[in-house]
Image: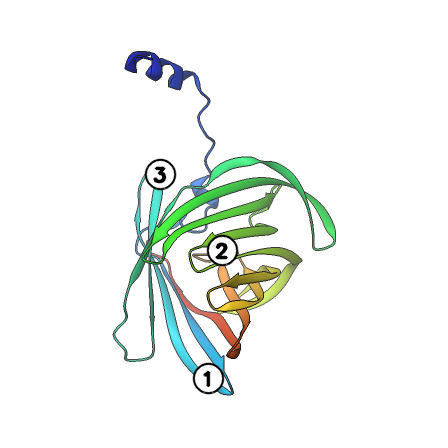
Amino acid sequence: MTVLTALMMASLLPAQEKFPDEDHVWRRFNAGTWIKSRVTIEIGGSSMEKFQKLTLKEKTDDSYLVEETNATEGEEPNPNATRTSNPVHGGVEKVTAAGKEHACTMWSSKGKNDGGPLESTYWYPEKGKNPVRIKFKAAWAEGEMLAVSMDEKVKVADRTLSCVKMEGKIRGQGGEGTIVLWISHELPSSQARLELVLKNEGGEVKIRFEALEIHEQK
């Protein structure tokens, strides 16, 4: 096959549908937007507190870059950047979640950071801004969550948001356990709160994320 023939054939293929920027949890914001969360870690009766900051650093036509820092108060943060592809259409599927059957569109994306490759698939109901099912896989863990409530009130800074509450399982290098997530399309990253419980040979680890503050770059 000649190069010219290959190019002509490629031009006849339908373009992959992409997730609209105006509905995306990061791409709808300008670079410089960030969200800060308190992270509480409990191990064997003792606890420690850190602060996570996620900042949108860059948007291109086909991807976006988010920088993550985690540090205790006064500690020098060590940034880790994740570049993620724009989600592409993956088909349609019915999902039963929160006591109701939803006709959903599947959207998938791939990313990469210092920890390795990342893959995520989201099931969005018709006219819905938040997914009702999430499946993810990374080098360190994989899991799946399903919506159990479509309207849970969560306070973030001076705002009370209507969130989708999701529950699921996670397994990976840190052990196996449960994950509970509250998400809102109004927030950068969408994460309002997250509770993770992991069990391994060393015992039980509890990790809790609570969004505290957001900055929307104008």
Vertical relation: 202 (above or below) 27:
below
Residue occupying image coordinates x 64% and y 39%: 93
| Residue type marked 3 | Asp
Query: Does dot 1 land on a helix, a strand or a loop?
Result: strand
Vertical relation: 47 (above or below) 25:
below
Instruction: Residue under label 3, please give it.
Output: 62
Residue occupying image coordinates x 45% and y 48%: 119
**Residue most toward the front?**
201
Query: Does dot 3 land on a helix, a strand or a loop?
Result: loop
Mark nearer the N terminus (3 vs 2)? 3
| Residue type marked 1 | Ser
Classify the position of the N terminus by image quarter: top left
Residue occupying image coordinates x 61% and y 51%: 132
Mark nearer the N terminus (2 vs 1)? 1
Q: Nearer the viewer, mark 2 or mark 1?
A: 1
Mark number displayed over residue 198: none
Residue 34: name its quadrant. Answer: bottom left
Vertical relation: 18 (above or below) 209:
above
Mark number displayed over residue 47: 1
Left or right: 2 with respect to 36?
left
